[in-house]
Amino acid sequence: MAAIWAARTSAEQRIVVLDGAARLGAKILIAGGGRCNVTHYQVTADDFCGGSRNAIKKVLGRFGADATVELFAELGVRLKREETGKLFPTTNKAQTVLDALINEARRLNVSILTKRRVTRLAKNEDDAFAISGEWGEIISPRVILSTGGKSVPKTGSDGYGWELAKRLGHTLTPRLFPALVPLVASDDWRPKELSGVSLPAELLVHSATGKKLRIVTGDLLFTHRGLSGPAVLDISRHYLDAVEDDPQTQLRINWLPGTPSEALDATLQALGSASLRKLLREKLPARLADLLLELAEIDLERTGDQLDKAARRRLVRLATAMPTPIVGNRGFAVAEATAGGIPLDQIQLKTMESRVCPGLYLCGEICDVDGRIGGFNFQWAWSSGYVAGVSAGS
């Protein structure tokens, strides 16, 4: 994206893309289950974490979701909106997106050089950049770093871009951790027995004092390690951040989203001679319904009028605020994004040029910006890549 807009802005400069991989675009190809969730139909700064919302808003405002749709249409890629608001190529193939970008870059005479991992980036005595690796060296007056963070390092984003930026004077946020990542539950957490079962749920991050820090509602997937699915990925960065501040932070789950504990309690009290198991199975997957009754120490055949107060309270807590003993996460190897990076206050947001190293531009996940699931991280890539490309090419 940055190379395309640098080339569109300046027909006189030579634009060179250096990529350490043998093939371009690995992250595009694996995104969205191989379909590539290009963006979301509605993107605001509130969909992101990391840098200040106002700072993120400035960059998004230069090249928003509508501009992304228009650009890809111009490049021959039609996008379709799904119920979730996510926009995918009508071909349902990520390769369509990657081919369009590569073809446009080549049309603009951008030199794309693969197997060119950059291991050294420094300014020489002429105040130009010496960019080098085992493959050789290039001298350039301007450089755009778009190396990503640390998520899915096998695609090339292994954090080395941060090292290059640090050598040129940048610092990083105090915390760098996986975002949009599956969570690992303790071995004795019984719901792991339901691996493969998926359902809508409401996830809540609670402080040690009981304060609700974050609430996310969406689909959840049980795995043999713990939890995954869109809602879990979205809540993960908030839980992992909060637990760093307070190890007593809890993740609780309401298996009946939209139903507060008081409402379920009232329903159970009014159940009369009806079956508890039947009620729960109408609202939840059968295996989860039965497990909740077992964990609440309630016989599967019990009716509402046979339920004592203590048992009823146990069931209400397990169904609407189940404590989930999280012991870790799946790490950068599978995380879809990185939380943390180069702080936005080290970047001139009108241009994405470094404030500490003139001539250096930064865009994408190398910056301290991470979006929720749904195409938002791609939109940050398009927006920041556009700004960096136009500015470096001017």
Image (spheres, rainbow, N blue to C red):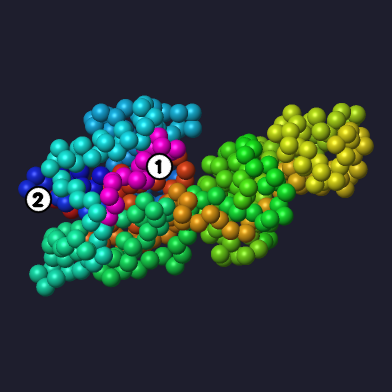
On residue 184, which mark appears?
Answer: none
Q: Residue at horizontal 74%, vertical 42%?
A: 319
From the top left corner, tell me how far across and down residue 299 is, in percent.
Answer: 88, 39
Q: Is residue 50 visible?
A: no
Q: Residue furthest left?
A: 12
Q: Residue at horizontal 41%, vertical 41%?
A: 31
Between the residue at mark 1 and the residue at mark 2, the CA separation in whole angstroms equals: 32 Å
Q: In this rendering, would 232 be left or right of 97? A: right
Q: Is residue 119 visible?
A: yes
The residue singled out by tag 1 in the image is 30
The residue singled out by tag 2 in the image is 13
From the top left corner, tell me how far across and down residue 314 is, in percent.
Answer: 81, 47
Tell me the kind of residue under disc 1: Ile
Q: Nearer the viewer, mark 1 or mark 2?
A: 1
Question: Circle 1 sits in a helix, a strand or a loop, which is it?
Answer: helix
In front: 205, or 94? 94
In front: 62, or 363? 363
Tell me the kind of residue under disc 2: Gln
Q: Is residue 29 magenta?
A: yes
- Say which label, 1 or 2, has the lower sequence index: 2
Are there few (<14), some (14-19), or many (20+) residues within 10 Å of tag 2? few
Q: Is residue 201 magenta?
A: no
Are there few (<14), some (14-19), or many (20+) residues within 10 Å of tag 1? some
Dots 1, 2 in contact, CB < 8 A: no
Q: Residue at horizontal 72%, vertical 55%?
A: 188
From the top left corner, tell me how far across and down residue 158 is, in percent.
Answer: 37, 59
Q: In this rendering, would 172 be left or right of 252? A: left
Residue extent of the magenta highlight = 20-41
Looking at the rendering, in which quadrant would you find the N terminus?
A: top left
What is the quadrant of residue 176 in the picture? bottom left
